[in-house]
Amino acid sequence: MQIAILALQGAFQEHGAALDALDASHFEIRQRKDLDRPFDGLILPGGESTVMRKLLLDLELFHPLKVRIQEGLPVFGTCAGLILLARDVEGGASCFGTMPIVARRNAYGRQLGSFHTKGEFGTYGTIPMTFIRAPYISDSDQGVEILSTVNGKAVAAQFQNQLVTAFHPELTKDCTVHAHFLQLVSNTLPQKAAC
Amino acid sequence: MENNRYGLNKELAQMLKGGVIMDVTSPEQAKIAEEAGACAVMALERIPADIRAAGGVSRMSDPNMIRGIQEAVSIPVMAKVRIGHFVEAQILEAIEIDYIDESEVLSPADDVYHIDKTKFQVPFVCGARDLGEALRRIAEGASMIRTKGEPGTGDVVQAVRHMRAMNSEIRRVVSMAEDELFEAAKQLGVPYDLLCYVHENGRLPVVNFAAGGVATPADAALMMQLGAEGVFVGSGIFKSGNPRKRAAAIVKAVTNYHDAKMLAELSADLGEAMVGINEQEIKILMAERGK
């Protein structure tokens, strides 16, 4: 299993460290030729979504990645990554738009609104959550499974092979969300033939 | 769970990594910077090159001017206060700035003490020329460090000198025996526990950007290859012939700083770079302010 991490800007090294802790191999995508390497899952990290959106377009990564996501490539977006996947973005432009959710950018205000908390993630129990100038999911279509709710707002969700969190699991030592994503990736891989 | 403000502030700096923070003096420039891919903007009334040219005392910008920029863009907005001027910092905190730069670019308000940054909720970035300055600023509560370089010159030599000095001292500290750290902390004038962090991790405990004199995509990539985690560009963009194009090129250079072919493309046809002044030709060394 090989995971690609979009490394245009932001906290992509932290995702690499989280995957290292789970013994998952990974590499960085910084330009078009990096897409020639095979990969089974994609991580869109935290950072500034406006920067990543611009670089995705300018570096001609946008269309090939969008096609692969639409074809079912498992993808995990944190914070800015959630915004990149959302169909609609309040307070900004949408990017891939492959996930039928509405993201509200900077939903908690400026840096003074950033916070740490703990919350339920799916059926895994309580995990630490770090929100940095974070968005939340203000609306979603049927078929989107809400995995976490904090203060009445949806902050983690899954739709088919697309997983998003408004918080940053890569900034904590808790690997629950990354492990969930790797399971999702592994479910899409062809079963190894017994021989 | 208690909110660890300092932790959150260090984490915001992590989100800025691999990005370019651009000096802007108006909402229009802030828009151009955001569209070009800036990960944050630094709001100030005059860019360093003009501060240098104008002379006189330079201070925190008008809060209304900063508010105008906050309203114009969705990315984080930073602003500068004078070294030691904690009331200017209180004012910026009151308007909910995302990051305060306690900056040698402005005239220092205190020639002995820096701001006690632990008293604030908002994050601070500070300049440093070497490991000692960096760790002293971190001890005072800075959650991000940048090289000082020499602002407003378009001359990258000092940023290179400061980054190399910091990295070489970090390597020296890493190689020390544990019982040598006490004396090293004394010599550097830094807290022992922060030096232990550097010894164990081989890096500063906060994100470290390059700043001061970066004017071209090649300068930005140079600083990244020397170990910077991102780049501040001050006068280099809006003092150049084609700010929009140059800004976008520097952003791409910071992402693909190892790809010489791409850097060649990015460096072509950018129009005139800021004229710049060599370090020997300037009267005020801003990097000498605050130690």
Image: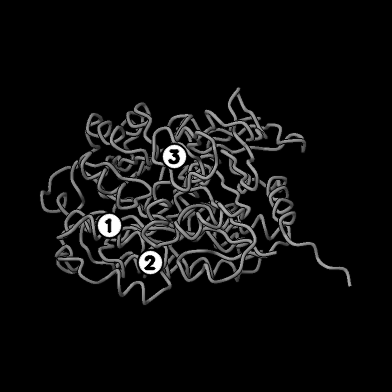
Say what secondary structure mark 1 lies in: helix
Where is residue A91? Give x, y as percent: 39, 34
How many angstroms separate mark 3 from mark 1 (CA)? 25 Å
Tell me if label 3 and label 1 are in contact, CB under 8 Å: no
Earlier sequence position, callout 3 versus callout 1: 3
Q: Secondary structure at mark 2?
A: helix
Name the secondary structure under disc 3: loop
Q: Position of residue B199 (x, y in %)?
A: 60, 62
Residue B216 left/right relative to A112: left
Closer-to-camera residue (B102/A38): A38
Disc 2 residue type (three-letter): Met
Quickly name the residue at label 1. Answer: B247
What chain does mark 3 sit on? B
Above or below for B244 versus B277: above
Q: Along the line of sight, which residue is nearer the eye, A184 or A69?
A: A69
Height in image: B36 above or below A100? below
Q: Which residue is mark 3?
A: B123
Q: Please indicate whether residue B272 sits to the left or right of residue A121 in the image.
A: left
Instruction: Have a look at marks 2 and 1 and say if they share a chain.
Output: yes
Q: CA distance from mark 3 to mark 2?
A: 24 Å
In the rendered structure, the residue with mark 2 lies on which chain?
B
Q: Residues within 10 Å of mark 1 (few under 14, many from 20)?
A: many
Direction top: furthest residue: A152
| Among numbered discs 3 and 2, the one appearing first in the sequence | 3
Quarter of the image that includes the N terminus of chain A: bottom right
